[in-house]
Amino acid sequence: MIIAILAIATLALAFGLLLGFSSIRFHVEGDPIVDKIDALLPQTQCGQCGHPGCRPYAESIANGEDSINKCPPGGEATMIALADLLGVDPVPMDGEAAVEKPKAVAVIDEQECIGCTLCIQACPVDAILGAAKQMHTVIGNECTGCELCLPPCPVECIHMEPLKVDTSNWKWPFPNNASPELVNAGDARHA
Amino acid sequence: MHKATSVSNRKLFHFHGGLHLPDNKSQSTGDPVRKAPIPARLIVPLQQHIGEIAEPLVTVGERVLKGQLIARAQGYISAPVHAPTSGTVADIAEHLIPHPSGLTGLCVVIDSDCRDEWIDLPEPLTSYHNSDPAELRERIRQSGIVGLGGAAFPTSVKINPGPETWIKTLIINGAECEPYITCDDMLMREHPQRIISGIEILMHLLKPERVLVGIEDNKPEAIGAMREAAASSGLTGLEVVPIPTLYPSGGEKQLIRVLTGKEVPSGAIPAKIGIVCHNVGTAAAIADAVLEGKPLISRLVTVTGEGVKTPANFEVLIGTPARNLIELAGDYTSKISKLILGGPMMGFTLNDDAAPITKAANCLLAASGHEAPDPGPATPCIRCGQCAAVCPVNLLPQQMYWYARAKDLEKTQEYHLFDCIECGCCSHVCPAHIPLVQYYRYAKTESWAQEQEKQKAEQARKRHEVRVARLERLEAERQAKLRMKKEALAKKPAAKKSNDADGADPKKAAIEAAMKRAAEKKAKLTEQGVAPQNTENLTPAQQAKIDQAETRRKASHSATTVTDTTESQDG
Ligand code: SF4
Ligand code: SF4
Ligand code: SF4
């Protein structure tokens, strides 16, 4: 009896120590849930969600201050991914986020650009090159299509161009000639 | 699954599933291969291979010769493009290309001058046995050779497995398992010698222990011709192996399974298990490149189906419009329903026959309504499991379909979506007519796109973080400057006050002090060596220090010491 109690006590102590040790050893720094949410956001940094960038929106979702349906560039796919991650029910997209826009990048009309640098200051990802009184240009590969550079331009020489579909980024369409409902084996028809 | 069949004396293996399909090959094998005439205008796409698009080297209006390099490979996984005949570059522009999307691609358009004049070709490497494998590989790379079985993967990459990989078995794919297609069959019948020469070169490059040429047993003429050529070559370790006709035994991993009994692991290439597989057409192209210096500018194409009058095989210059071949085959019949590039199982519909023949185009199937029937409206899946029974990769097509339908891409990948070879067996047998392969293709391209988007988002996040950090740093610097200015402002009035008390203008005083110092310095320099006299009432200790300093100064003849001493006393 005493041996049994001792054995159990020793085991309890050992596991207690192990747990205590691992909680210190494997302590996770920072706020992992914010990182996880941020990883799902499209990083367009456009501010359309009402926050100054994706991470602030992630923080606000994590704190339960904002809902998951505010990001237009991410669209429904992002909303569903967020719902999945947070274990909440999907909600319909909010207001203007409901309309999906085709992906586009900003293009500066280099003839008209006056080199005012205002767009450079607006770009959240430093995707615009140029210097004062020099022509500016957008690095197409880095542009997230956030449209933040459009309003500051005093001569309105920036416009959005939809991304071109070519054979390298073309996608097979979702089959449209088939929309049978998933059925249970029980009500299967004989073909 | 491990049941052995004895078609030859070699033990063969089975892959899972597969289909016995009516082969429909005899329609196009009646006549020998004909050379298609040079078209008036050739449209040569710069992307005919997997990998980076080739970069054009010619300009509009330039005259090019047959075999001239017109676009060079960009990057390791890429292939150069050569002019298929002599003529003038009419345009370098977007043109309709054979692609399931029906989109355009960058092409070099050449107006032929009908002279078919060759450029000076590189020296034939007939005695390649003594030459460096690297030189051979370079020749094959420069010749623009890609896998001619349909995948169009650059051959130069496949023949360079790296020093750690030892290729034990070289497999030559002459299975040609898809119905209707006969171009490999005809090549083996008519040019077995070229294929064997190519195999010999590959053997020199890869040093395999054995070479197995797999040919489906519905091609007895090809098997006979290849056996004869193999025997007369005297190559050891080379064996022509007839295999049972079963679609898709010509799939790379399926053929490997049949011939060696080995499974290529999921997601890996055959080189991982010491096997490399090349198509018979590729082997012949390698022979042409090495032994004659000729780049890849033509290929055999089967034109067949009830939709053309006289099905046949043609040797076609790359860039020849599909339309020309249809005319050579006696033009369309009234039965034509759709034009398919490739076979009925894995091919795709060509909506416009203005699209050119590329290195990957093995067959034009002008199908009648009965040859390529519309599957009809899909009905709900009845979970019959037939799709899983025929899948040669042993996947669960029904499950993949359900997840693809629900757009749950992660789940489809858990069911090994990317191992699917899109052979079409599952769709073929599905009693509910569900276009299963279409779902997998959708899920594959969608997964790639999402993966790319993720990477782009990651890059944008980093750039944004860097920008935020920079702005913060600039702000901090600005604040610091502001603080310093404020402090300086706070000090200045104080200094003014103390000077005011002395009753002198601080600027003037400073200037006077400086002038005084300068004058003193000058005086001292003229005296040179005389102890400074502007000190009075020194304590003995101070005097001793000064004396010490003097001796040091004298010892070093340094004028600066003098200045230093003076200034320290001034201050
Ligand atoms: S709307 Fe979406 S992409 Fe734009 S900043 Fe907010 S989270 Fe980022
Ligand atoms: S063959 Fe078609 S109906 Fe049968 S289980 Fe597969 S998908 Fe469902
Ligand atoms: S298409 Fe894919 S899932 Fe269907 S049978 Fe072929 S390999 Fe299997």
Image (cartoon, coloured by chain):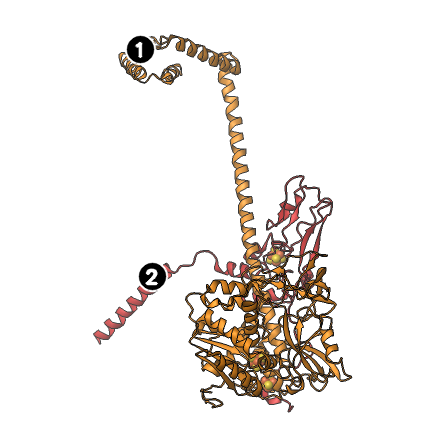
Chain colours: A red, B orange
Q: Is residue B545 left or right of residue B191?
A: left
Regarding residue A64, the answer to whether it shows in the image is no
Q: Which mark is residue A21?
A: 2
Q: Assess disc 2: are there few (<14), some (14-19) or many (≥20) residues with their C-alpha within 10 Å of its C-alpha.
A: few
Q: Is residue B13 left or right of residue B563?
A: right
Please state the horizontal and vertical placement of residue B157, each as a whole percent of the image.
52, 66
| Most foreground residue, B18 or B487 | B18
Which marked residue is nearer to the observer: mark 1 or mark 2?
1
Mark 1: amino acid: Leu
Mark 2: amino acid: Phe
**Residue A171 against residue A152 in the figure, above or below:** below
| Most foreground residue, B310 or B256 | B310
Q: Quadrant of residue A98?
A: bottom right
| Most foreground residue, B41 or B357 | B41
**Label 2 element class:** helix
Q: Which mark is residue B538?
A: 1
Distance between the Cα atoms at labels 1 and 2?
Answer: 72 Å
Please state the horizontal and vertical placement of residue B482, each as a whole percent of the image.
54, 33
Chain of the residue displaying label 2: A
Locate the C terminus of chain A by quadrant: bottom right
Q: Quadrant of residue B324?
A: bottom right
